[in-house]
Image: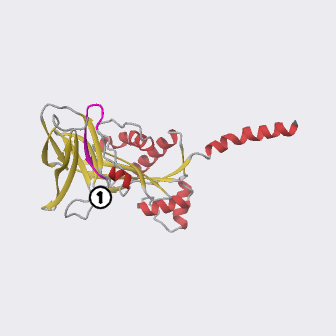
Amino acid sequence: MRRFCIMILVAWICFPALADNTKLRVAVFDPTSSGTSIDEGTKVAIREIISSTIVNAGNYDIVERSLLEKVMQEQSFSHSGAVDDNDATEIGKLAGANKVVLSVVTLTGGRNMLSVKMIDVKTASVERQKVKVVASGELLDVIEPLTLSLVDASANSNEESVVIAASAGTREDADVKPVPQNNEVVFYLPPGYQPKKDKQKDLPLIVKFDREMVGSGTLSTGFTIRIPNPGNGVHKLVIGGQFAIKVDLNKYNFFELQIYRWNYLGAAMYGVSLKEQKMIK
């Protein structure tokens, strides 16, 4: 009897620890920047907001910052905390992480585009990526909801300005086209898209519909943008701020896009054409 009680006591003590071990370990790295520079305080704020949001989601543990720094020091990686995808995957693996999270702040069109992505360390593939374009003063405000939508794929799936960005190079993501639902209209660019006469794939794109920004993404991630169908005739769609095309939402609610890009006086110019348009009921 005494032995049985001891076994019960040990199980009671150990069970929470065993439950905690089922959580995935995530390594969160400092954000990088493109087209702009962010100060050290902003970097720390972005990293900590992402970390706290992931922890509070309940399914993840965060790898301690000191452990990441120790691994980077031992393996002669950069001390800045800003690393590329390959380095982050290797560091995360050495630190015992299951996933790594990277973020990038890009200045585009006078606004900031924030990209947050989660990478699996075993496959080195991007599992999920979320992108949002906001005014500079709103950058810190969007980090928590964007991170929540990253760790919970079902969150904010119908929010107009949230981009559903599939991982590039994944066959099933590239082959499966989105289907409009509940009177939606869908604009779609497949992941891993290669524009004509352009070898630069990771270019930021802003998508506007009747002058309202409805989403953003990059050529490499592609995007699926869902918005309520306003109907009432012909509307204008703009990619990258230039050269609108007209779409008739009375006839169609699904649009697969083609993007082309060129330089004019040193400025990137984007164009858009339709590969496919159809009505899906």
Q: Residue 225's quadrant in the figure? A: top left
Position of 221 with respect to 121 (left or right) is: left
Position of 4 with respect to 272 (left or right) is: right
Asked if residue 186 is among those painted magenta in the image, a careful observer would answer: yes
The spot of residue 149 in percent (x, y) is 40, 41
Quadrant into which the N terminus falls: top right
* Closer-to-camera residue (163/265): 163
Asked if residue 243 is among those painted magenta in the image, a careful observer would answer: no
Q: Which residue is mark 1?
A: 202
* Closer-to-camera residue (269/230): 230
Camera sees residue 169: yes
- Residue drawn at x 20%, y 42% is 278
Q: Residue 246's quadrant in the figure? A: top left
- Residue drawn at x 38%, y 52% is 172
Relative to 17, residue 90 above or below: below
The spot of residue 16 in percent (x, y) is 66, 40
Residue segment shown in magenta: 180-190
Quadrant into which the C terminus falls: top left
* Closer-to-camera residue (269/183): 183
Secondary structure under tag 1 reads loop
The residue type indicated by label 1 comes to: Asp
Residue farthest to the bottom, as pictured = 76
The spot of residue 10 in percent (x, y) is 76, 41
Relative to 271, residue 13 above or below: above
Q: Dot 1: within a 10 Å radius of its alpha carbon, few (fewer than 14), some, or many (20 or more) residues?
A: some
The spot of residue 106 in percent (x, y) is 30, 53
- Residue drawn at x 40%, y 37% is 155
* Closer-to-camera residue (31/91): 91
